[in-house]
Amino acid sequence: MLWTPTYLPCNFMIFFQDFSLNLRNELKYFLLPIMKKILLILSAAFMVLNVVAAPKKEYKYVDASTFTVANKAHNNGLVYQRVDTLKYPELTPQQKKYLNFSTGIGLRFSTNSPNIRAKWTQHDQATRANSPAIASNGLDLYIKDKEGKWLFAGVAYPKIGKKEATYNLVEDMDGQWKECMIFLPLFTTIDKLEIGVLKDSEIKSDGGFTRAPIVAMGSSYTHGAASSRPGMPWPAQLSRRLGLDIANFGTSGICKLEPGLAHIIADTDADMFIFDGFSNPSAKEIRERLPEFVKIIRKAHPDTPLVFLQTFYRENSNFNLKKRKFEEEKRAAASEEMKKLMANDKNLYFLDPGLYAGDDHESSADGVHPTDMGYQRAVDNIEPHIRKIMAKYNIK
């Protein structure tokens, strides 16, 4: 059969349609996936080249024990320990362990480095159900702003299960000189700490020991249980508000007005002592121990203001009647005994409410310990009273 031109358009269209369909299928199922893979490989190659090409940031390290030591009461040569517990044989083993912790201690320095890194070794790693690892074993950094206020800048995370850690506290700052302070962990002792700055930057500190004019002694509330990080217990928050160092002698769960703790206060040079002394002992212990506790301190500090704080309300007693009764009895005992002692001591003070976290029942981490918000509310409550006492005794 002869092929005639009249069939040309029809056959050509069929051919063209088949060709187009095959081409689309080839592009869709073969060429496009290959092109995507090529693009991904090229992108990855460029990323690798950028990483390789980027200059590695080199750090130089300085021994932090040479920095100015803040928020510390005893100039005992033990930079990272609050108390030389060997001097107090009457302390319990647990009290000695806790008072050896670095709780509340700050280290001050200045630097123009855009990055600040911490490298540290701790004596052991604390594991606490109600405290984050950052608070128990980590560090946090504060930097003074242009108004002279300490402003949070960053944290250094510990390595879970490890005694050594390295972490950048802050990065990519503007390179201007800044005054810095690092708060040490709440529930362990620092054995060694080095602060790293970029190699072409400078870091300096006056060094030495600055006497804390105020000392806070107390329970886990003072120690900082359930705080999110080392700079958030109420003594640290109050210190930043007042612009004064406050040494933290908190001993979680074991501050029961014992003579050994009173002897530490008697040996401490400070302008004011603040006590969270009614959180751990029972009503019976408060009645039996408080007079002797104050007597021991008064022999060494006859005119120094002693400020006792009523304890926090415990949220776990909202429905537990046994716990509620126990808490109400000890609060009543504290109030009654303080009233008796204050009748003959014009330099003795009792703040009630003292450690007050509000009445909305929303500031507890575990039914006993406050959150950061709870500690902040406590500081909101006691700060004006503390300022009045400071003014009366010219504490600056």
Image (cartoon, helix red, strand yellow):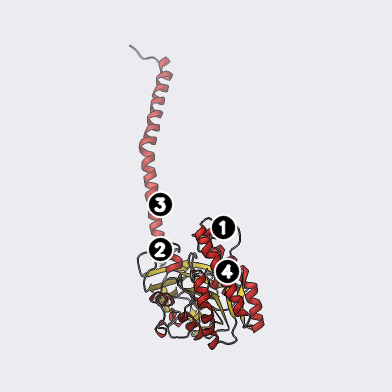
| Local secondary structure at mark 2 | helix
Query: Which residue occupies the foreground of this view, 26 or 267?
Result: 267
Q: Which amino acid does the dot numbered 1 rest on? A: Glu
Q: Which amino acid does the dot numbered 2 rest on? A: Ala
The residue that disc 2 covers is: 53
Marks 1 and 4 sit apart, C-alpha to C-alpha, by: 24 Å
* Quadrant in the rendering for residue 29: top left
| Residue 245 in view here | yes
Which residue does the image show at 56% across and 71% down from the upper left? 333
The residue that disc 1 covers is: 362
Marks 2 and 1 sit apart, C-alpha to C-alpha, by: 51 Å
Image coordinates for residue 102, horizontal then vertical, percent: 44, 75
- Mark 4 and mark 1 in contact (Cβ < 8 Å)? no
Is the residue marked by circle 2 packed among few (<14), some (14-19), or many (20+) residues within 10 Å? Answer: few
The residue that disc 3 covers is: 43
Q: Nearer the viewer, mark 2 or mark 1?
A: 1
Chain-order first, disc 3 or disc 4? 3
Q: Quadrant of the C terminus?
A: bottom right
The residue that disc 4 covers is: 332
Q: Which amino acid does the dot numbered 4 rest on? A: Ala
Q: Nearer the viewer, mark 3 or mark 4?
A: 4
Q: Which mark is residue 228?
A: none
| Local secondary structure at mark 1 | loop
Chain-order first, disc 2 or disc 1? 2
Which residue does the image show at 41% across and 82% down from the upper left? 90
